[in-house]
Amino acid sequence: MIRHTGVALIALFLCVSSVQAKELGNFGVTYRIAERDALTEIEERAKQVDWHKVLDKRKVENFQGPPDRVRLPRARQSRSFPVDMTYTTEIDVPDGKGGILYPKGYTFNPLDYVTYPKTLVVIDGTDPEQVKWFAASEYDKRLDVTLLLTGGSFGAVSKRISRPLFYADRKIVERLKLQAVPSVVRQKGRIMEVTEVKLTKGSGTPAQGRKVAP
């Protein structure tokens, strides 16, 4: 089933765009999550949409992703680097009670308030070696993994990978500072860590890598 890229984007922003529907605490003091994990709620809502009824089968099979998708090169080396998720609001974010939760220009790190428990794996669906690598990796068997495609036909990729497919648009790529694929993204404390995976030529298996200092 296709998941709308907007859902993935909201999740990647760790609820920055959906705070008006959540109570995070008192502005100016300390924030806490008073309701259930917003990411879980978002995913549950996404599952209620049957995209096969919205799009006919031919459109689903030929779907190539959002128009603003970004093609990324294959990783030339295996390395890891941190991504600071600190965000500055561009508008006043309401609290849902007639007040303002975050004023325009307010800067904060959403990872100080929300834990993102999932691992994101980003691949180019037009590259058979990357699809092969994912299908043979541990990530394909893990329920806590979300797969994002920078390109590729939904129909073609879904024949090799029998799990939900998301597409990464330009905002996701820029927000996570993705530079190459395959990339594995996971939370490490107050940052997101991006690990690029170099595949050995013709084998679809990862090569040894290194860490990039913050």
Image: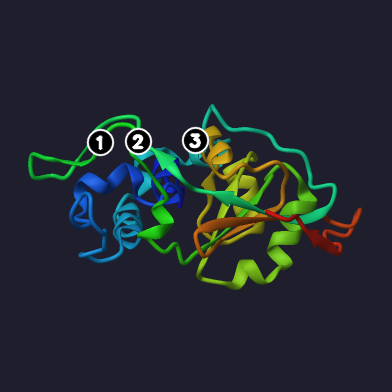
Kindly indicate whether the residue at mark 1 contacts the one at mark 2 (C-beta within 8 angstroms).
yes
Q: Mark 1 points at which residue?
A: 103
Find residue 97 and report its horizontal and vertical position in percent: 8, 45
Res. 207 in view? yes
How far apart in space, not on screen, are marks 3 and 2 (Cα)?
A: 36 Å
Q: What's the distance in space between the residues labelled 2 and 1, CA to CA?
A: 7 Å
The secondary structure type at the circle numbered 2 is loop
Image vertical order of residue 126 relative to residue 43, above or below: above
In the image, is residue 37 above or below residue 101?
Answer: below
The residue tagged with tag 1: helix, strand or loop?
A: loop
Q: How crowded is mark 2: few (under 14 residues within 10 Å), some or many (20 or more)?
A: some
What amino acid is labelled 1 in the image?
A: Pro
Q: Which of marks 3 and 2 is in front?
A: 2
- Residue 144 lies left or right of residue 122; in this view the side is left
Residue lying at 25% horizontally and 36% vertically, measured from the top left: 103
| Label 2 sits on residue | 89
User: Cα distance, mark 3 to mark 1?
Assistant: 41 Å
Q: Nearer the viewer, residue 65 or 6?
A: 6
Crowd tier of the residue under label 3, counting other residues whose Cα lies within 10 Å: few below 14, some 14–19, many 20 or above: few
Between circles 3 and 1, the one closer to the viewer is 1
